[in-house]
Structure formats: C-alpha cells, structure tokens
Image (tube, coloured by chain):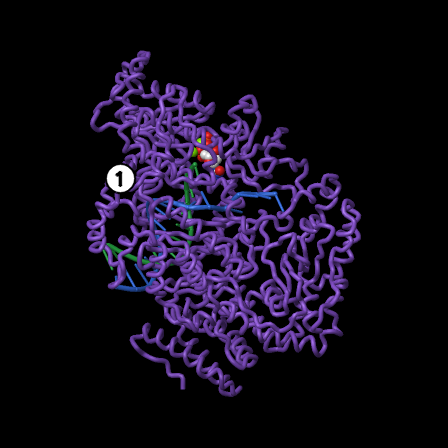
Chain colours: A purple, B green, C blue
Amino acid sequence: MAGRGAGQRGDNGWGEWGGYMAAKKRKLEEQFDKDCMNNVQQHERKSNIFHGISIFVDGHTEPPADELKKLMMEHGGIYHAYYSKDKVTYFISNNLPYAKIRKLKPNDKVVNSQWIIDCIKQNKLLSTHDYEMYKDKTKSRGQTELNFKRMEPMKLITSDFNVPNSDDEENNSLEKTSSSSSETEEIQDEDDDHLSVLDAKHPKFLETFLKRSRLHYLSSTAVAKKVYVQDLRQKTEHRLLIDKRREELKNKLQRTERDYLFKLNDEKKDKIYMHIDMDCFFVSVATRNQPELRDQPIAITHSKGNKSTTSNEHQFFSRSEISSCNYAARQYGIRNGMYLGKAQELCRNHQAKLLCLPYDYEGFHIVSDLFYNTVLNYTLDVEAVSCDEMYVDLTELIIYLKPLHPLTFVSLLREEIQLNTKCPCSAGLASNMLLARLATRQAKPNGQYYVEKGYEQEFISKQKILDLPGIGLSLLDKLQQNYSHHTIETCKQIQNLFSLEQLKTILGKKQGQTIYDMSRGIDMRTLSKDYLPKSISIDVNYGIRFQTFDELTLFIKQLSLELHKRLKQAEQKGKQLTVKIRVRCSDAPIEPEKFMGCGKTDDSSRLINLHSYIDDPTIIELETIKLLKQFHFIVADLRGIGLSITQLQSTTKNIHGKDTNGTRTLFECNQFRVSKPVISTDNNQNIDQPSESSVTRKRPIQQEQTTAIARKLTRHDCYTPGQIDPEVMNELPTQIRQELEEYLKNPPSLPESNLDLDRNEIVEKSFTQVIDHIDESVLNELPPEMRHEIAMAKKLRTIESKYPPIGGKRLVPITNPSNPTIKDKSNAFNVLMNSPQKQTITKKTLNSIKKWRTETILHEERNDPIVRNEQNVNQSEKLKQQPNIAGCTSLNDVKLMLREWIETSDEPNQIDLDLFQNYLIDLLNFYNAEMVHQLLIYSLLQIKTLTKIKWNEKFQILINTVQKHFGQMYGGATMDLS
DNA sequence: ATCCTCCCCTAC
DNA sequence: TAAGGTAGGGGAGGAT
Ligand SMILES: Nc1ccn([C@H]2C[C@H](O)[C@@H](COP(=O)(O)OP(=O)(O)OP(=O)(O)O)O2)c(=O)n1
Ligand SMILES: [Mg+2]
Ligand SMILES: [Mg+2]
C-alpha cells in the first residue's frame, strides 16, 4: 500500500492512469508500426527527469516492461533489455525471486516500478529511498539467513503488487541455501552473468545454448554423419581402401564350422542387414578412460548432481535431463531423457548413488568418428542414423567373404570398434532393417544377435509394440482405445486383434499399413543412400523470456543469422519459410517447473512462400517478423520459436537431383567441431577427414548453369516475369545484396493480410498483454467501461471459444467451437487466436486437447508408461457439444451477456465482435439458426434502444458475414432481421 | 484425386 | 537451476 498510497492517486493519479491506459493503444500502435528491422524507436520526449538514469526491468512488473521502457525513453532515461553491470543504475522489479535476491551485489538497487510512475507524476526525480526493496540484503551480505528474516516485512509492504506464486518455494529453500559459506564467493565470481543468467534476451544466449544443448548436438551430428557417408561413397580412394581392407580381413580370417555352414539361399535376393549402435553412448565416451567407474550407475547431465538429497523436497528435485545413463543405472529403472531428480529417487530406493558426469562433446565427436570410420573401412553400404548408430547392408560383404557366418564378421568388427573407441557397442542382424534394429535391442548391452531365417515370426511375435520404430505412446494409445479390455503390448496381439482395415481406420492409411507389416516382421525398406535435406531449421524452446517486442526482434535476428549459416553450410536455399511459436498456456504457471523451460504451451505455425530460393538472413528475419505479426500472442508468454526453411534447392547441384556426383558439402555444426576428428583407426588405415574433403571443395557449377536454369523454369513457376533469375545472381560477387534488392522490389505477398486489421489486432494483443498485470484492487476502481474491456479480454483468454483468423475477413465454416470438458485443460485463447485462416477451429482445438493429454502423459509421466490413456474424449462426441460464448450456452445467458456488453461499451471492441460473430457461425453450423436469428434481433434492438450509434456500422458487417454464412448453408437464403 | 497448410508424432 | 533440437513421415481437412 505504501508505494501507491490511496491519497496519492486520488484525483491526479487516477486521471493519469486513465490517460495512461487510453494512450496505450496509440503508443503501441506506433511501436508495432515501426520498421521491424530496426529496434531503435522514436519516442516523443516529454521531459528529462531520468537523465543519466538507466534501468533494467526484471520479473513481472506493473506496468509491464515495455511500458516502463517507453516511459523511460520519454523522460530522458535509458532502458536496458539485458542487465549489464556497468550500465545499469537501478533494477526495477516488484518481486524479485529469491534466487536473484541472493545474487544482488552491494550496490545494486532494486526499486519498485512505482517510483517511475511517481517521478513522472510529479515531474521530478524523486529519491528512490522509499521505493527500494531488499535494502537490508544489499548492505550486509554474507548473513543471508538473517537478512532474509529482516526482508520479510519488506515483502509484505509490497504485497499489493503481483507476487509470483513461486514465492513460497523460495522462502522454503532459504535455510539450506543460505547456510553455505561459499555463497558470497559465488556471487563475486559472477560477473556479467549476474542476474537472470542466460535467457534469450542475453546477446550470447543462442550461442551458449546451442553449445550446450545435447539435442542440438544430436540433430546436427546426425545430419553431419549422413553427409559424411554420402560424400565418402563417391570417393574412389575410399573404395580402394575398402578393397584393401577386405582383402586383409579375408586373409586373416579363421573360420569355424558355423562359417562353413552359413549360406544365403539366394545371393541375388536375400539380404543381411545390420543395425549397430553404441551402448549408452555418452556415458561410455565419458568413462572411456576410467572404465572402472562403469560398474556403478552413471548418468550424463548438466547438473552436477550434488544437490542430491535424502528428502523429497520439491526444490531439490532436479529437472536436468539425463542424456544417457549406463546399464547399471537402467537396472534401477533410470532411462535416457529422465529428469535427474527422478533418477536420484530411483537410486535412493536401491541405496545406490548416481554418478553424474558432464557432457564431453569433444569426446563424443572423436568416438563417433572412430565408430563410423571403423565400419566404413569395410563397406559403404551404410545409412547413418545418428552419431552412435547406423544401418549396414552386409549382404555384399558377406558374399565376398564367404564362407562366413555374418556374426563372425560382426564379432571382429565390434572388437575393432571396442579397440578403437574403448567403448562397447551392440549389433543386430536380420533379413530386413526392422528386424535388425529390434535385434540390436535384444543384443544390448555389448552383444550381438542375428534373427536367422525361419526364426523371424517367433522373434517378432514377442516384440513389444512400443519397441517398434515409429510407434510411440500416442499411437499405442490410439490402438489401446479400440481394445480397452486388453492391454495391448506385443506384436502378436496386433496380429491377432486388428485387421488391416481396422488399423487403417484407427491410424490412417499409411500408418495402418506400416504397423500391420511391422507387427508381422515385414519391412521392405532398403538403405537410403541418397541423402537430400528437405528442410533446415532452428528451434529454441528454452530460455525464451521476452518482455518487449524489441527483445524478441533482436532474437529473431540472431535466429535468422544462424539459419542462414546453416543453409550456407548445407549449400541450400529454400523457397518457403515456416515460423512456429509456442505460447504459454493460460492455465500454465508463468514459470514452469523446469528452469527456463517452455512448460505447457499452445503451438502454432505459419508458412510463407517466398518468390525465389533464398538463404539471406535479412530476408529471413523480415519475413519471420511479418509472419510473427500474424499470430496473436502476448510477448511475455512466448516460450518457444522456430524457423524452418523448406522447398530446398541445392546451390551446387543439378536441379533435377539426378545425382550429378558432384559435390555435397559436409553439413557440420561448428559449435561442436572443437577439434579435428580423429580419423586414424588403430590399424592406421584411414579415411579422409570429412570436413576438409568436402566443405572446402569448389563446386563446378558453371557448366551446368544454363541447363539448370532451363530445367528449373519449366519445372516451377517460382519466378515472376521480369525477375532476375537468382541462379544467375548466384554467381555474382554481390550476390547477397542483389538478392536482397530483388527481394525488396518484389516482396512475397501475404495473401490475407489486411493492414488495418493487422494493426488493430496487434493493439489488442498489446492490450491483452497488460491485463494479467492489473491488480484486483486496481481493477475495482477502474471506470466501468475500462473494467468491462479488461474483463472481456480476460474472458477471451479463459473461455473455450474461438477467435477469427488473421485478417478476420475470410469466412470459414466453423463446425464446433467448444467443449466444456476441455475448458480447464487447454488454453483456447492461444490456440484460437493463432488459428490458421483456412482451418476450422474445431480441428485446432481438438488437436490442442490431444496434445495436452499427450504431454501430460508423455512428459510428466514419460518414464512411467503405465499411466496413460484415461479420459479420452471421443471426437464425434465433441461435435455434439453446444457452442458457447464466454461459457454461456442458453439463449437467456447469452442475451444477458450481450446486453451487458452493449450497455457498457460505446463502441464494440473488435475482439469481442469477432468472438460473437464466430459464435453465431458456430450456432449455424450447429443447425441452430433459430438462436442466431433471435440473438441478432435482440442485439439490434439493444443497440437501438441504448442508442449506441457507433455500433451500427461494425455490427452490420458482422451481420453481413453471418448472413453470408447462412446463405451458404441454406441455398442463398437470408435471415429476416426486421 | 491431389495438393496445400498446419499441425502431430517419433527418433536420436 | 538449466541448456526441452530438429528432420522427416504422415494425417486432417480445406482448396483446387
Ligand atoms: N532422450 C535422449 C536419447 C538419447 N540421447 C543421446 C545420448 C545417448 O547416449 C545418445 C544415443 O542414443 P541411444 O538411443 O543410442 O541411447 P544410448 O546410446 O545412450 O543407449 P543404448 O545403449 O540404449 O543405445 O543420444 C539424449 O541425449 N537424449
Ligand atoms: Mg546407443
Ligand atoms: Mg542410438
């Protein structure tokens, strides 16, 4: 109460707030209208009271950060998007979490945002004295526990501000953390890392994140290996090397009886596939020089695992993910991908201690290269799967070495791998890839298994469905839905319980067929040897915490640049850009359990067709922002973003992809390529080093250019007349610039964007951005009209209803708006606000629910597959649900709501209008034209009797739209509304 | 029918 | 604390 005392706000204060609220839309309009490429924003200078003051806003404040930013700029101050020790004079925060309070340095001042408001109100720089928070802490460090107790009253004082729900946890964690004597040293050691260590606002975030992300490592190395194998395949030197190695092997082989007995029935048709995979790869690598450790349970995590605890206390449950765990750990039920906390718990139950080792990316590289090269020394019939795994077609090799049992060779091969890498691996052999892969599972750890001819049926029958590649919990769940009386587990059950037709109905045509085949051990795939990328993308769903659109823009710039680099590296350009966002579900807490994680989100994506093949970072950035603006989301709620380039075309290869033997570059990820790969195997027979062989290779494009262009032009209509062919520009030194110029001349069209409406929506978006930060007590004192507006906006976010597609223009048939049973689970607002134009709300909403279920099942319980599939809402059932608006379904309720709406607003808000319009269309689709008719009549009557003149025009548009829809349904008829 | 967009799922 | 990326297959349902 102190900060914004009642006395202060009386006349002046609230008028100002009102004005402030009213001015908001205009200001935000300005902000979003400005050139996106440039973050520098012009602000009208109103005073200079904050001259020399710079602030850093942390946590959730009221008003929100972007408002504070504007206020600072308007009054001569500086706003920093990211904390920097030297530049920032004040932290602005209403509720620093304890973790951050702990790290405050002696001179750091945390000031309540009210200070800024009050300064502006009085038009002078006030002392921060009365606004400082956590003061005691900053004066006497090293006595954290005491300090905190003295801080308590301070917190109480600020209790009329938003207090994060995490507060309690923080309090609880105090005793333990504060007693550590090394606490203060830690603080001093931290420098720029100071606060909010690294979220996506930090300029180095992306770099750091990618460097540390294991999943990024996996993705990038998988591609790298595919490229590597493909490159090698075209090298004659390497083929000679293989011949030599095979010859050597043949000479030193010591055959036993089984070798002489082994025969392929038909050397032309029979196949021997091998799937080979390193055992607990990351752990094996990390322990390859201390194999004595391997008897105890080990996991690879980012967390050191020190905080391991003997209690179940919430705050010590580590959400650091286990990348890989060894077999000693698996014995206790620990699995890859499991949270460390859970693993520690499992260990504790067995009186064991889990050893946590850090990632050794350099080691992974070395071992992975050795692993690949050891195999590739014998054959090029290899399909890379990942850094620790590949398929090999052994047929030809075994024929060459005959008489030889395949397992004899595999034993030798695995021995050699073990020798070279000091890491174990396992291999599965069979007549097709599927069975080979399943055999590997059987073989692990450190073993091999051959599903020989005649044993295939027996083998497949006992396999678990979940072990089939491509079948996960979701698909299994779908099957389970149809057989609730059995627990479906094995392939045998699939064989017996489902006909092909059934499977196709349940899972779709292709997946049905695939599962039908797989459950019978049938797999007709062959090694795919021609690797052609179909998409190149970058996703970040971690550490995404923005407060202003500018911060987001800055991050997009980095993403675009990174994506550009990847395209370059892959020598690809693309014609299509897809932007994907993840937005915090409204029912999800602001901060998820996992630190800096994305939590439960609603996802949306949208693509744009570019008019030419591009890889330019600026274009990517520009288009991304354009696409981004078509979504409706609250910047602070953004939790993830992804850019993807598709419709790729090689910049060096023949267009028709008819494999011009040329030149494929090694698409390697620089972050992880910390040292040159070790290429020598023990036997000193080497394969060319991947990176130098292909990355630097000059490409022979000139000769092919004209034909390439000719072919391309006949193949695609991707060039508008008069446009310079990018293929030609390609070879010019100023290529990028020209491309950009060209692009700017002919920007791709955004089919349904309507500028006016766009802007309108963004304003609304910005408005909704604030509503969460409005305190209840504040709300109550607002004038009725404003209160209503806020209430409506809030409703929109919590009710199950829909929001019109971008541009609001296109009329789409909307079949089903809502389902009350979903209401609490899925955030309709995010889903619907971001719904694609051309899709029904129904579908998107249903998907969202499904996803919610799956995520609950897969993520929260993902290591506990027993807990799944309960409340599945039948889709056809959903279609029968009443449409509703703001939770109202009955005619009377809706009428009451309408009346309130019309009564309290002089002018209808577009969001509300759209909401209503779509509700009416829902009703039509629900064959309740009668209700539509009554509601429209009623509304018109209200507008008339309450003399809301400004409503007429907008409402007429709504009516026209509804009429049109009505006409479509009823053969051109119109409703009589007179 | 087939294509297109926007998803979802799976795998490492 | 923690580093939840990405490629590719495929389905739903509207557009053509
Ligand atoms: N959820 C996962 C799965 C895997 N990986 C990483 C770590 C693994 O070591 C590597 C290889 O994955 P595998 O599926 O081959 O698993 P492992 O090699 O660890 O064990 P296995 O012996 O079962 O192959 O990928 C990961 O980071 N997160
Ligand atoms: Mg493995
Ligand atoms: Mg593997």
Q: Nearer the viewer, residue A349 or A267?
A: A267
Q: Position of residue A776 (x, y in %)?
A: 66, 67
Work out whether A233 lies above or below A795. above
What residue appears at the point 27 percent right and 44 percent down from the top-left corner? A653
The residue depicted at 46 percent of the width and 49 percent of the height is A539
- Residue topped by disc 1: A662
> How many numbered dots are placed on residues in this image?
1
Residue A507 point in image, percent of width and height: 35, 48
Given residues A484 and A547, the one toward you in this image is A547
Horizontal side of residue A330 vs A523, given as left or right: right
Q: Position of residue A106 (x, y in %)?
A: 74, 51
**Which quadrant holds residue A246?**
top left
Which quarter of the figure is the N terminus of chain A placed in? bottom right
Q: Is residue A503 visible?
A: no
Q: Is residue A724 left or right of residue A882?
A: left
Measured along the vertical axis of the image, is residue A410 above or below residue A201?
above
Single out the residue that lies furthest toward the front. A733
At 30% from the left edge and 29% from the top edge, which residue is drawn? Answer: A380
Query: Can you say whether A177 is above or below A294 in the image?
Result: below
- Amino acid type, mark 1: Gly
Task: Place residue A163 in its image quadrant.
Answer: bottom right
Q: Which element carries disc 1, helix, strand or loop?
A: loop
Viewer-proximal residue, A561 or A62? A561
Is residue A545 at least partly visible in the picture? yes
* Quadrant (top left/top right/bottom left/bottom right) for the C terminus of chain A: bottom left
Residue A746 to residue A732: above or below: below
